[in-house]
Image: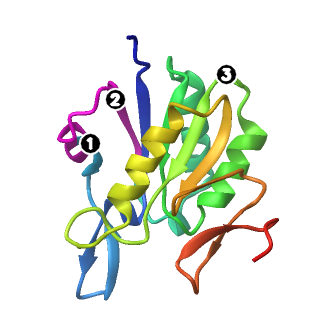
């Protein structure tokens, strides 16, 4: 059985952060913990990693967004997992939806509200696993996979006071 390569595009965010007690907040790691973590999972799929930046998503610039677009456009792969900070994940998903020329790729965004390393429990490993499973089932297009749900860029929003993502179109 042939398995597609999943290209993991890393941009930082809480998923790839550590707690800095002197600033009482999480700070992005210098380099991603995701390659070592995902390789330890003994997945059947082959993964390729590209670290675009390691930033809190609120600190991302237009140049960072353009580099994400370029990385995805230039990828030889059709399955792209983007790890991203949750604050601006919906914005970047919408930006890609409007600016990517390629339409043959399945692009899934994910992240976490609690860092992958140093905290237990963390939503990071669940969100990564859910996203890796769904990227194999979804067709071309852009999705956000958070909290066990799949969202389109047009509907997704972070509900900060609940600590999860929602569809702006769904009724409670």
Asked if the residue under mark 2 is in contact with the one under mark 1, i.e. CB atoms within 8 Å, the reply is yes
Would you say residue 53 is visible in this rendering? no
The residue carrying mark 1 is: 38
Q: CA distance from mark 3 to mark 1?
A: 25 Å
Q: Quadrant of residue 120?
A: bottom left
Would you say residue 108 is visible in this rendering? yes
Q: Secondary structure at mark 2?
A: strand
Q: What residue is drawn where x is 82% and y is 65%? A: 169
Precedes in sequence: disc 3 or disc 1: 1
Judge left or right: residue 152 versus residue 127. Answer: right
Q: CA distance from mark 3 to mark 2?
A: 19 Å
Judge left or right: residue 169 versus residue 138. Answer: right
Residue 11 on image: x %, y %: 44, 50
Q: Quadrant of residue 115?
A: bottom left
* Vertical side of 52 occupied by 72: above or below: above
Residue 80 on image: x %, y %: 51, 33
Q: What residue is drawn where x is 27% and y is 72%? A: 121
The residue carrying mark 2 is: 47
Q: Secondary structure at mark 1?
A: helix
Precedes in sequence: disc 1 or disc 2: 1
Find the magenta span and give its range. 36-52
Q: Secondary structure at mark 3?
A: loop
* Vertical side of 95 occupied by 72: above or below: above
The residue carrying mark 3 is: 104
Q: What residue is drawn where x is 45% and y is 66%? A: 56
Judge left or right: residue 75 versus residue 125. Answer: right
Q: What residue is drawn where x is 55% and y is 23%? A: 78
Q: Residues within 10 Å of mark 1 (few under 14, many from 20)?
A: some
């Amino acid at each position: 059985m042939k398995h597609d390569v999943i290209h993991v595009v890393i941009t930082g965010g809480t998923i790839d952060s550590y707690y800095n007690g002197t600033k009482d907040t999480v700070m992005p790691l210098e380099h991603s913990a995701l390659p070592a973590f995902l390789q330890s999972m003994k997945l059947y799929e082959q993964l390729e990693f590209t670290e675009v930046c390691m930033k809190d998503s609120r600190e991302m610039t237009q140049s960072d967004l353009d580099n994400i677009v370029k990385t995805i456009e230039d990828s030889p792969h059709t399955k792209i997992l983007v790890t991203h900070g949750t604050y601006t994940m919906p914005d970047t998903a919408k930006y890609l939806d409007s600016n990517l020329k390629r339409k043959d790729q399945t692009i899934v965004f994910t992240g976490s509200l609690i860092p992958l390393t140093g905290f237990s429990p963390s939503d990071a490993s669940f969100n990564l696993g859910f996203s890796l499973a769904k990227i194999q089932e979804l067709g071309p297009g852009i999705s956000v996979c958070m909290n066990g749900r799949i969202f389109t860029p047009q509907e997704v929003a972070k509900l900060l006071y609940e600590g999860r993502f929602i569809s702006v179109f769904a009724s409670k």
